[in-house]
Amino acid sequence: MDGKIVFTRGVPPPEAFPAEELSECFDAAIRNDTAVVLQYGQQPGYAPLREELAREYGVSEDEILVGNGSLQLQDLVSARLVRDGAVVFTEQPSYDRAISTFRRRGARTIGIPLEEDGISVERLEAALSREVPAFLYLVPDFQNPAGATLSLEKRRRIVELADEYGFWVIEDIPYRKLRYRGEDLPMLREIDSSHVITMSSFSKLLSPGIRVGFMLAPSGLIRDVTTLGENTYLSPVLPTQAAVAEYLKRGWLAPNIERLKELYRPRWEAMSGAVRRELPEARAFIPDGGFFVSVMLPEGANTENLVGRAKDIGLVLTPGSAFFADPDDGEPSVGDRFVRLPFCAVSTEQIDEGVRRLASLI
Ligand SMILES: Cc1ncc(COP(=O)(O)O)c(C=O)c1O
């Protein structure tokens, strides 16, 4: 197979977008609630969408903020919680844009090693004995970039630690509903919500371009972040929020998620199989859902200029080190051996060939 294969894009492919249905919802939203939807206002987000989310998550409407994508909400939360010299803990590796957002807000960002069943609680406890972070940022379900899912036991311990030491836990769950096998584990907030901020998004369930993301948190924090949002973007983008509200009201989300799972499952199987077949020496994270398989290449692997050499043979990779925060123990980062393999926006043929090309380089 010829041609460039792109393993950098953790995005939905064009065939994932429910374009016709969304068009209908945009049309209805703008016609039915024109004066509100086309006006400035409703800073915590479009009220009917907040009502839908309040019902789904069992919270009150003043515990919900709907903003322009979840990354911007993470940025606003960081602006609110990160004081000079503050530290933030993340999984190691973690979502690259989250790491850079926290750093941009002045946080020292420390990565706690990720294991197959989520962050190492032992290393987290050791780090807590040295300093308490402003918050711990986790992607508990089908993590970006590694694919790992946090075990129930660790979920329980982490909320206990948050109560004991008094730090916030951000659980960022944009992939949670895209599970291909197994049973859902409770969200951290379902175990104990007192120190938990939940972030999620419609980017992976409907479309990233609509920029509809939301957070759930105690009402005082929601109020503060809403004010920061108002001072940043004046008004959230109400037409897209109203279209999402309409989509939910019509009961179209659950069938769309089923359709997406059918679309992605063969790609997930292909990536999982290709990694096992072509990279048997690597430590692979095979997820139960989401967008990413990943591998930690063996110590002796040739990782010298891996991204450059991959490009020369038509394979586009993200440098593994982008997903690594400062190490928690001063050890050199192993980021050069880490490879994230997003599988949703590539065909099964591209997956097989791309992983073959990767294996030929190491
Ligand atoms: C873990 C995680 N959080 C947040 C985002 C950003 O989502 P949004 O489009 O809602 O800003 C992404 C996007 O890839 C992600 O992987």
Image (tube, rainbow, N blue to C red):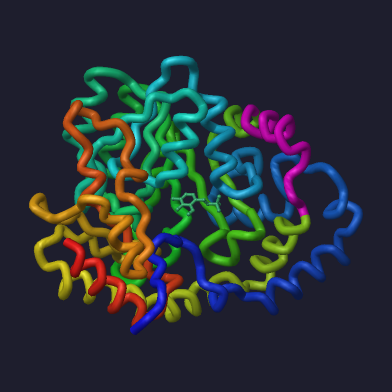
Question: Residue 240 location in percent, x, y?
Answer: 72, 58
178 vs 121, left or right, is right
Q: What residue is shown at x 32% (from left), y 30% (from top)?
A: 110
Q: Is residue 28 above or below residue 210?
A: below
Location of the C terminus (image quadrant): bottom left
Closer to us: 333 or 212: 333
Is 235 magenta? The answer is: yes
| Total count of labels | 0
- Side of 122 relative to 11 (left or right): left
Q: Nearer the viewer, residue 327 or 233?
A: 327
Magenta stretch, main secondary structure, is helix
**Residue projecting furthest to the front:** 312
Q: Is residue 151 visible?
A: no
**In this view of the protein, which residue sits in the foreground, 230 or 307?**
307
Q: Is residue 22 left or right of residue 201?
A: right
Q: Which residue lies at the image location 59% right of the left edge and 73% below the top edge?
A: 17
Magenta range: 224-238
Which residue is drawn at the image coordinates 44% and 33% (left, top)?
A: 194
Position in image of residue 54 (x %, y %): 60, 50
Asked if residue 284 is among those painted magenta in the image, a careful observer would answer: no
Location of residue 260 with respect to 306 vertically, above or below: below
Residue 7, quarter of the rendered image? bottom left
- Point 17% across, 56% down: residue: 297
Residue that extends furthest to the right in the rendered view of this protein: 35
- x and y, in percent, of residue 253 in the image: 58, 70
- Asked if one can make out residue 10 in the rendered structure from this viewpoint, the answer is yes
Q: Where is residue 289 drawn, in percent x and y?
A: 35, 66
Question: Which residue, as the protein is rendered here, is positioned at the far top?
Answer: 84
Q: Quadrant of the N terminus?
A: bottom left
Q: Is residue 159 above or below residue 343?
A: above
